[in-house]
Amino acid sequence: MQDPTESEKVTEEAAHEGQVSLRFAPWWKRALAFTIDKIILAVILTVIMGVVYQQEYRQFAKIANTQELWKAMMVFLTHESLKINVAQFILEAAYFATGWVSSGQTIGARIFRLAVISAESRKLNWLESFLRYGMLSLIGFLFWLPAVFVFNPVYRQRIQDVLVNSVVVEVPSGGWPKPADDETNRDDDDGAGL
């Protein structure tokens, strides 16, 4: 269990330094946002598969016997599972990484007003985003059990967050603060600028 005083110390230090105090996202908001993202991705993948495999689906529709249909579908999935899994991985990696690099948010995160940022309060770069998604993908093979455990209680970081030094925070009710004038002229290639 997390010691609330450690987390409070971090936000107090940020307030003393003139920074905006951010709240770490609770586990249930993270889980719901991720579930919404996975549902959206499942719908997109299903549509893509419907377009790519429309000929095979038409053949399935012609089979009246349930046992024959089941056998035909199993043969299809056996032959196409690698392609489908690779397509799913690429689609999900692109979706999550693009959201984290652009605004720190996916659609699910926007709904719950969450953002993934680095522990230094900047946007993740492409490498960090892909590494974070890669770790999430590996965690999926372990039935999401490692995602349950907090590895760094001060920042409420799960294993994928520790890997790239990211945190999941709630977006302030007034939105993100505007950068100072000297920050707006700075080149944004390093992913800073939240």
Image (cartoon, rainbow, N blue to C red):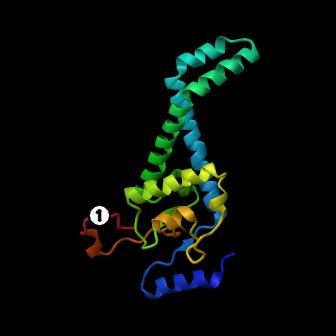
Hey, which residue is sitting farthest right in the picture?
Answer: 66
> In which quadrant will I find the N terminus?
bottom right
Image coords of residue 92 (percent x, y):
50, 45
Image coords of residue 87 (percent x, y):
49, 36
Camera-nearest residue between 159 and 115? 159
Q: Residues within 10 Å of mark 1 (few under 14, many from 20)?
A: few
Residue shown at the point (50%, 32%) measured from the top left? 83
Quadrant hosting residue 136: bottom right
| Vertical arrangement, residue 150 with respect to residue 134, above or below | below
Hey, which residue is sitting farthest bottom in the picture?
Answer: 16
Mark 1, secondary structure of its residue: loop
Q: Which residue is denoted by mark 1 in the rendering?
A: 188
| Vertical arrangement, residue 166 with respect to residue 60, above or below | below
Image coords of residue 181 (percent x, y):
28, 74
| Vertical arrangement, residue 150 with respect to residue 135, above or below | below
- The number of discs equals 1
Using residue 177 as the reference point, say whether residue 28 is left or right of it.
right
The amino acid pointed to by label 1 is Asp
| Vertical arrangement, residue 49 with respect to residue 88, above or below | above
Residue shown at the point (41%, 72%) measured from the top left? 177
> In which quadrant will I find the C terminus?
bottom left
Residue shown at the point (32%, 75%) measured from the top left? 180
